[in-house]
C-alpha cells in the first residue's frame, strides 16, 4: 500500500446523486496511523451484508417490489465482498423511488472525496471515502455517515432473480446495482466539461475560500492516458505514444499556480479560459473524448492488461464518456459490467455466457485491475480476457439525468437463455448477410434508457 498523507485536510462533499453541482469544499481533520472500531449507528433500517451496511429506503407503494430490490442489494454487496478484501464496512444509502422519468435507471455518488497526497509522486488527489476507509492508517471523526449515496428509479421495468424468463424490455437489477456501486467505490473521473461545456475538459477546479488549490484529479485519473495521434507533438519521446492525465493536469496548474489568492473569481476564470494551457490541454482532451476510437485508456498499475479503452466513441457526454469502458470493445466480453450501455433482455447469467463464462463472475478481470490500481485488495487472480465479439442487443444506457431516449431495434439480440436464436432457421449465407446489414441500420434507432453514475451518472 502506498504511503498517503492528508496534507491539508480538505474534503469535497456531495449530497444529491441527481445534481452533480451540489457540493461543498470543507475542512476535515484526519489522524494518521491510528484507527478505531467502525461506528455502529444502531438504525433498524440498516442491514448488514458482509462488508456493507445497507440503509434501504423504499418510497413506493409496492412491498413486493421493495423487498425484491432490497434483496438484490444484499446479493450484490455479498458478491462485491466476495471479490474484494474489505477490512472496514462500507455504508451505502439507497433510495428506491419513483422519478417519473422513463429514461433513467439510477444515479450514484461517493458522499465524500478526501484530498490526500501520495508520497510516490507528491501529487494531491481526491480519494472516495469508501476507499480511504480501507487504508489502515486513517481514522477520522469526520468520516460522513454514508460512504455511497444511490438512487434507483422504481419506474423502470426491472428483472429480479426468481422472476422467471426475462423479457426484451426488462433490465437485470443485479448487474445494474453492482455497476452503480463500482462508481461509488471509485470508478470515477473528475475530468468533465463543467467549466466550458461541450468545448473543453479539465479536472476539478478547487478553491478553499479565496485560495486557488489547483486542478485536482481523482485517484482513478492517475492511471488514465491519452493516446497521441500520429501528428501530435510527442516531445521526441520514443518510449510511448501516451500522455498521462497527470502530466496534463500539471500543465493546467501552471495557470495559477496553486496557492495564490483569488479575490475576483470571474477575472480568474477569464484568465484560465484565455490561457494557452487551456487550449493545449482542456480543448485537446475534449476533442480526444468526442467521437474518437481508442483515444483514451486506463493503464492499471502492476498488470499487463493494456487494452482498457474508456468510452470515447460517442458524442461527449459527462455521464457516459471516460467514466465507463468502451461499449464497442467490451459489451460482449467479461468486462461488460462497466460499459455505458446496459443491455436489456439479458440476465446476469446471459451476460456471463455472452462474455465467455469468466470464472470470476460479473466483476471482470479488467475491472478488477482497475479497482486494484485504485487501492482495493482483491481475492481473485486477474487474468486478461480478450474474448471481445461483436453482437448487438436492445440496450439501456448508463448516462446522465439530462439524457434522452432514442429509438432503434436490433435483430441480432440474445434470447433470455443466453443463446443466439436469430439465425436458427436461416437458409443460405446470402440471407444472413442481408439481415446483418439490416441489423446495423436498425441498431442506430433502438430504444435506450439511461443508467447514470456517481457525480455524473
Image (cartoon, grey):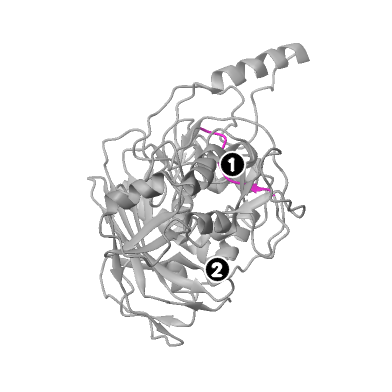
Dominant secondary structure of the residues highlighted in magenta in the image: loop
Sequence-wise first label, 2 or 1: 1
Between the C-alphas of marks 2 and 1, the distance is 22 Å
Q: Where is residue 350 in the image (x, y as percent from the top left)?
A: 59, 41
The image quadrant that residue 159 belongs to is top left
Element assignment for label 1: loop
Cβ atoms at labels 2 and 1 below 8 Å apart: no
Residue at which label 1 appears: 326
Q: Write down the quadrant of residue 7 in the picture.
A: bottom left
> Which labelled disc corresponds to residue 149?
none
- Residue 310 versus residue 167: which sits nearer the camera? 310
The question of residue 154 being in magenta is answered with no
Left or right, 372 with reference to 408: right
Percent position (x, y) of residue 377? 58, 70
- On screen, residue 93 versus residue 250, left or right, reads left
Residue 190 occupies quadrant: bottom left
SS for tag 2? loop
Residue at image position (50%, 56%) is 187
What residue do we see at 72% from left, 54% from top?
Answer: 384
**Which residues, given as a range, are shown in magenta?**
307-314
Position in image of residue 173 (x %, y %): 44, 46
Quadrant in which the N terminus appears: bottom right
Which residue is identified by label 2?
376
**Residue at 31 percent of width and 78 percent of height:** 40
194 to 404, vertically: above or below: below
User: For mark 2, does the 10 Å Cα neighbourhood hold few (<14), some (14 to 19), or many (20 or more) residues?
Assistant: many
Q: Nearer the viewer, residue 56 or 92?
A: 92
Residue 311 belongs to the span the image colors magenta: yes
Amino acid at each position: 500500500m502506498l504511503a498517503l498523507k492528508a496534507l491539508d485536510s480538505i474534503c469535497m462533499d456531495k449530497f444529491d446523486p441527481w445534481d452533480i453541482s451540489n457540493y461543498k469544499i470543507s475542512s476535515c481533520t484526519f489522524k494518521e496511523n491510528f484507527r478505531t472500531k467502525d461506528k455502529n449507528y444502531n438504525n433498524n433500517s440498516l442491514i448488514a451484508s458482509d462488508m456493507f451496511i445497507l440503509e434501504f429506503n423504499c418510497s413506493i407503494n409496492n412491498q413486493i417490489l421493495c423487498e425484491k430490490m432490497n434483496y438484490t442489494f444484499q446479493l450484490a454487496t455479498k458478491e462485491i465482498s466476495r471479490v474484494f478484501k474489505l477490512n472496514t464496512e462500507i455504508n451505502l444509502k439507497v433510495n428506491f423511488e419513483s422519478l417519473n422519468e422513463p429514461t433513467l435507471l439510477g444515479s450514484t455518488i461517493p458522499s465524500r472525496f478526501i484530498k490526500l497526497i501520495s508520497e510516490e509522486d507528491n501529487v494531491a488527489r481526491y480519494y472516495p471515502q469508501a476507499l480511504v476507509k480501507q487504508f489502515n492508517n486513517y481514522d477520522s471523526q469526520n468520516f460522513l455517515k454514508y460512504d455511497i449515496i444511490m438512487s434507483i428509479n422504481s419506474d423502470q421495468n426491472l428483472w429480479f432473480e426468481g422472476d422467471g424468463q426475462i423479457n426484451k424490455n426488462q433490465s437485470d437489477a443485479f448487474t445494474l446495482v453492482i455497476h452503480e456501486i463500482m462508481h461509488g467505490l471509485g470508478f470515477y473521473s473528475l475530468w468533465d466539461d463543467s467549466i466550458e461545456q461541450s468545448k473543453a475538459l479539465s479536472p476539478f477546479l478547487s478553491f478553499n475560500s479565496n485560495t486557488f488549490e489547483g486542478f485536482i484529479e481523482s485517484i482513478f485519473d492517475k492511471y488514465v492516458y491519452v493516446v497521441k495521434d500520429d501528428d501530435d507533438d510527442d516531445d521526441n519521446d520514443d518510449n510511448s505514444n501516451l500522455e498521462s492525465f497527470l502530466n496534463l493536469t500539471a500543465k493546467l496548474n501552471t495557470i495559477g499556480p496553486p496557492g495564490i489568492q483569488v479575490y475576483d473569481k470571474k477575472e480568474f476564470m477569464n484568465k484560465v479560459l484565455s490561457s494557452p494551457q487551456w487550449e493545449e490541454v482542456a480543448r485537446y482532451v475534449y476533442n480526444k473524448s468526442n467521437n474518437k476510437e481508442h483515444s483514451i485508456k486506463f493503464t492499471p498499475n502492476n498488470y499487463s492488461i493494456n487494452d482498457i479503452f474508456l468510452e470515447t466513441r460517442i458524442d461527449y457526454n459527462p455521464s457516459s464518456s471516460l467514466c465507463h469502458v468502451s461499449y464497442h470493445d467490451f459489451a460482449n466480453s467479461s468486462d461488460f459490467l462497466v460499459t455505458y450501455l446496459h443491455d436489456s433482455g439479458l440476465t446476469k447469467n446471459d451476460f456471463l455466457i455472452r462474455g465467455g463464462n469468466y470464472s470470476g463472475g460479473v466483476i471482470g478481470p479488467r475491472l478488477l485491475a482497475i479497482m486494484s490500481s485504485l487501492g482495493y485488495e482483491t481475492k481473485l487472480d486477474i487474468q486478461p480476457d480478450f474474448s471481445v465479439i461483436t453482437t448487438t442487443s436492445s440496450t439501456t444506457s448508463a448516462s446522465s439525468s439530462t439524457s434522452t431516449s432514442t429509438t432503434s431495434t436490433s435483430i441480432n439480440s440474445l434470447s433470455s437463455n443466453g443463446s443466439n436464436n436469430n439465425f436458427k432457421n436461416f437458409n443460405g449465407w446470402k440471407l444472413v448477410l442481408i439481415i446483418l446489414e439490416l441489423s446495423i441500420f436498425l441498431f442506430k434507432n433502438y430504444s435506450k434508457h439511461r443508467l447514470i453514475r456517481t457525480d455524473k451518472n
